[in-house]
Image: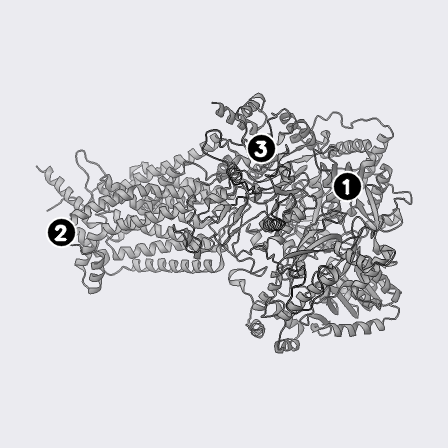
Amino acid sequence: MTSNESASSSTTKSGKPSYWRSLSELRGSEAFDQYLDREFPVAASEFPEGVSRRRWMQLMGASLAFAGVAGCRYPEETIEPFVIRPEGRIPGESYQRATNFELAGRVYNLLISCVDGRPLKIEPNTEHPSGVGTDSFSQASILGLYDPDRSRDDEGFLLRNVKEENRSYASDWPEFNDYLSALLENAGDGSAMALVFESTRSPSTVRMLSAVKNRFPAATLCRYDSVNGDAMRQATTKVLGTAARQALDLANAEIVVALQADILGNDSGMLNNAAGYAKRRNPLAEDGMNRLYVVEGGFTSTGASADSRLALAPSQIPAFLAKLGRKVEELVAGGAHQHSDGEASQAYDELPAGQRLERFIDVLAHDIAEKPSQTVIVVGEQIGAEGIEAGIRMNQKLGSLGTLQNFYPLPDGEIEGTVSLGELTAKMNAGEIQNLLILDGNPVVTAPGDIDFAAAIGKVADSVYAGLYNDETGALCRWSIPLTHPLEGWSDSVNDNGFYGVGQPQILPLLGGKDLIEILAIVAGESQTDPQAILRRTADTLAGEGLSDREWRQLLHDGFATNLNVDAVAPELKGDGVQIADEPVASSEVNIDSTEIIFAPADGLYDGRFANNGWLQEMPQSLTKLSWDNAAVMSPLTAKALEIEHGQFVVLTVNENKVALPVYEMPGCAAGVITTTLGYGRTRAGMVGGHEIEGVEIIGTDISPIRTAETPAIAYGVKARRRLDRYKLSTTQDHWAIDEGGREETETRSFSLVREGTAVLLAKNKDFVEAKGPHVPHVGADGSPWKEPINAIEEKNAAEGNPVPQWGMSIDLSKCTGCNACVVACQSENNVPIVGREQVLNSREMHWLRVDRYFQGDEENAEIVQQPVACMHCETAPCEQVCPVAATVHTDEGINAMAYNRCIGTRYCANNCPFKVRRFNYFNYNEEIGTGYGWNAFPSNIENANRKLQALVMNPEVTVRGRGVMEKCTYCVQRVESAKITARKEGGREIRDGDVVTACQSACPTKAIEFGNIADSQSAVAKSHKLPHSYGMLSQLNVKPRTEYLARIRNTPSRLMTRKQIEDLETLQSHGDHGHDDHGHDDHQDATHADNHADHDHAETREAKVTTEATASEEN
Amino acid sequence: MSLAIPNGLDNSVEQPGQRAPLVLGDTTYHDITESVCQVAERKPSTGWVIGFLISFALLQWMTVCILYLIYTGVGVWGNRAPIFWGWPIVNFVFWVGIGHAGTLISAILFLFRQEWRTSINRAAEAMTIFAVACAGTFPGIHVGRAWLAYWLAPYPSLNLWMWPQFRSPLLWDVFAVSTYGTVSLLFWYMGMVPDLATFRDRSKNKFRRMAYGILSLGWSGSSRHWMRYEKAYALLAAFAAPLVLSVHTIVSFDFAVSQVPGWHTTIFPPYFVAGAIFSGFAMVLTLMIPARKMLGLEHLITIRHLDNMCKIILATGSIVGLAYGTEFFIAWYGQVQEEQFAFMNRAFGPYWWAYWTMISCNVISPQLFWIKKFRTTPWIIVIVSIFVNIGMWFERFVIVITSLSRDYLPSAWAYFSPTWVDWSMLIGSFGLFFTLFLLFCRLMPVINMAETKSTLAKQYHMSHSDKH
């Protein structure tokens, strides 16, 4: 079908507007006719259909060209098919290139896996000295690259809006260039000109901004941070004399105190923090574990990872810090070590809120007083500048400032005289601004409710928006021009540890955008606008001397250079500090006229910029497990005070502005504290994230109306009222508010599913983990004809003298923070489709890897445990024996394999899988990304053609599954096979530990996942499996999972232990010491096992009782 | 040959030393032939036409739904993780269960020489065949790739040289149900041959004569034919009898062999078989009571027949009730946490309504049949039978859906809601069943004339000998 036909068919179809049809209407019929008349319309009919063959060849050629320029691996090539294949280039073979870029406030040091010039997968740059992993944003950025909804220039979609006519016309770069140069020439000193940019860690961008400022000295520069506001800048400017950002060295901290600081969650330094934190989470290490104290209002990933957590309203946190400071000072000065609440007869979780606070401060102060210089106190940016300042001063007193807490200068701090968005809006409203250039960030959406930036744009004569999407801001500006995606453009950035890095394109701009620095260079009137040249000049400046070509290529190749880094700010404090006198109050009373609302960036969407990224939209948010939805998260206690239930609406009012959000009941939030997430309710995100005009459902609720410029992060004293209507929140896991029986059962089981214990308990009884689970039956004892599959394989191997690796995985729950990087990495590696909100509501999400979350404890003082769950590759897999067509079978390497071609979809395997990790393709999800199913699967051919662009993200190594078949985690079998091929090529050597790195393992920022050959006793995974606190989930079913977990060990101080922890300590510490080496694969020696059980008293726990009974029957 | 048994006689009362008659009224051999044949020979009644049109429309709606399903994907049902099997499997087990009464009546009661079976066995067998047809529809369309369902068949596929996986209960199902279907069909058809010959002989037009002529396989009623017929019938009965027990046993393995809490129990085979007979008899009664009235067969299908069947319902219903109780006991006694929760969750979890519907319909309502008055009052029997049918559908719902909805990992728990396609297919399957049944009523001998006449002979013989 030619595009002409499809285009006309889409216009003649009535009823539902289709995507391009309405855009054509938007553009005006003249342009549309032109489009129809074009002899070779670009985006149709040829493979891949979103990109014409001509364009495809350009892209292919480009990737080769860039390979020559950037990667110094391949010689430069022209576009003709290869007659002689260039050296080192093997079609279809994957290769990796380093890059570094900034995304959503974080800086990534990455390797990009590409196949045939097509970037496919994000991996951390393992050779980078910072040694950090990845997160969900970076993992999902690959999908963003292929998003067909991005701004584009290839079909004349560079848009020019004409306000008077209230319509848009297609345009092109030459026209824009003419417009821009005319604009700049007439701008004079720029007094009527304004630039809006996001806070950035890119030195070149800052250099170009300064150049703009030089050319137009009177221009207004507005720096706008949509998430955190300026608290950290204000605090550091005051205390250190320069705007700086915080970098923590958690690898060397003994005690970490996070006060309303989500350092392991949505903090911009999360990657660095997580890596450092995890280094000290090995309970068996000689130097022991670190200890994480968290005080926070809502529940964050950091709080869930805490050793001890206190729920406290954010308004009380400065006072908490002050009190803690006073107490530590007293203790350090030799004050009496007195426990303020007498003997710790009551467990921490049994105390009323006020006493809990007292005891927490007391224990914390004692702990800090013992190791002051190894303690770092982190005050979250949400608390505001004064709190941050107080935190810095306290660290200085403790002696950890400059060692554990460091500050790096922010490059954009160099730009003098920037104004806030509010100030700029005032200027625009006053008519002082006539020329406006907005550099990405979509401020129309992210601006707080009291700044009507959208209306202000209307008062500006000439406005240009350079963005990745033609979004809400782009629609209001006169021009909307496309920027390049970080994976297809040049950029640079300084990472958390001060390392300079260059972002190099992996492919020519797919949709024809320009780099941000290039646009800025044009505005600044620079002679050199080539982005690579600009970056190189920045690097030269940083290095102090000009980099040679060789050094430059080396920098691009490695992704870092040890001599190119920025130094931390000297830890010398200025000024006297702040006085916070109040006593903190922890209350369980809720005042519904004065609640506290936390505005947190969404786990997937950040401030909304990833709203059109299906992977991030569908990614279950940590802790709430909400997908495609946002909510007002509050404790059941707060909900009760509001007379409201899970799923009912709550109306929050700030300055007459109202937002209604469905309630999500989450135990463990402080009373009267409501957490909301930014980034939802986008009206022009795209075909995935919602588009009002195209009739695509809006996802979630925009909460910006109740944010103010004054309180961008937390609003205090907010009136909350219930509304009676209900909403079905789409979650991937049951929420707190299920029926009482189900909730109790969930909690009871959670203790054996996610086994945990305190470090003290582990020290006293290494095998406590086994006692926490139900009794594991003995199968295949002497004389039984049953032979364990692993033994059969081992015998076969021994007979054939050809050792076959036995794959296994180990997941360390002490390290996992539930950040979802693995979930998105798996989705990206294995072509896992998204299914959309409606299907998530039907529990049909397809994630091969999920992170389970369980609540433990009561409404006020709950804990959260998390556990990544993927296929366990059971040695005696229940799924395999029930498949009538043998579509799921075991390989001799111990992988539970799926033969998709053989599967007919009886779904019996999924029923019989106790872990419920199998996913069924109820519809043809991959064909119809985000558009519709069944009858609606073919909305229009043009739309489908555009979706084909998205199909480029598919990993060619992995089968794309059609509908009607079962799928699940394969242990990244394609990576296993690839490693085997490599090993065979290298002389048939054995596969070494580390040859196979699964996608989840590679992505994990805390390195919580080990994968390898368990038959090799020297492999990391085999060693992990042998650790005393390693256990197999549901091993009582005798399924013999190959994935084992290392129990979560909390380093909780004894006086902050919960009742459960104390009970465990009392009942489990004397538990038997039978050998652990046989755990998992072999059976216990019957006699010793029985003895051990008989010797000890198990009367306390139900599980133990079962064990005794079972043992007794064996003896009989 | 005059039999002075009045039509209104209550033949459910046993007279000492005398068997109660199974055929009432002043009925002769010819009367039996007439009353059975007239059903097929006279013009269809308005009721039949309306019933047929409704059933046929439902059947067509089901066909449309199946096409929609195959075109779109099985996601049009409410199935979801972790309830990967939803209503289609509930319906499958329900219909297979219904299909148990016919063969039980014709084979097992035949072997036990229970002569009261003669006037009801034909219709019951037909019901079996049709119920198995309804049941057979679901597994085929239930799979994700229905066009490949034939891979379940036991042959080494040509392109893979691969047999199916014989360890899977689903494969056993294929064998069990197809064997049962085939044997039941043969048994039904063979038993019909003499009666089809009667139809052939009475046919007044060429087409009917030809059709029944072919179907009756040249039956002439000679002694040799009769001798072979009797032998073959007894053989087939012996062959079919164990199948009655095996089919639902194997269907129950679909659940019992898995390790889902609530499925993994050894009580399932007997409990499923009892439940199947229970539901099958209820369905026979539900259909037979209106049919005997409408077709004017009250003297052939007598109160005594109804009474006997009610007793079987009472017995099997109590077995089923006992099984429910035993499950709870074992769950408690076994001390497996997940198992205990599965049963508590059935009764008191989010599906409590389904569980208690099942208990009231299956355990409580049949207890009425302890009282003779209820066993002999047709309209009460119909009401109870309908309750039993509802209850038995819910039993399968409870087993399939509540067990799956909450198994080992609470993180994967979910709540099932059916879609309009689920509803349509459930109702549509009744359309298929009734379409076939109504056609059967019009075209085939609804009562086994030959055998009924033989009971008449005995009756005559008995009453005759009494006089001496």
Q: Alpha carbon of mark 3 to alpha carbon of mark 2: how far? A: 76 Å
Confirm whether residue B386 shows in the render. no
Q: Position of residue B264 (x, y in %)?
A: 46, 38
Mark on residue A250?
1
Q: Amino acid at mark 1?
A: Leu
Q: Left of A373 or right of it: where is A723?
A: left
Mark 1 residue element: helix
Please report, as a chain letter, where disc 2 is located.
B
Mark on residue B222?
2
Between disc 2 and disc 1, the foreground one is 1
Is the residue at mark 3 from the same chain as the one at mark 2?
A: no
Q: Amino acid at mark 2?
A: Ser
Q: Which residue is mark 3?
A: A1079
Q: What is the crowding at mark 1: few (fewer than 14 residues within 10 Å), some, or many (at least 20)?
A: many
Q: Position of residue A551 (x, y in %)?
A: 80, 57
Mark 2 residue element: loop
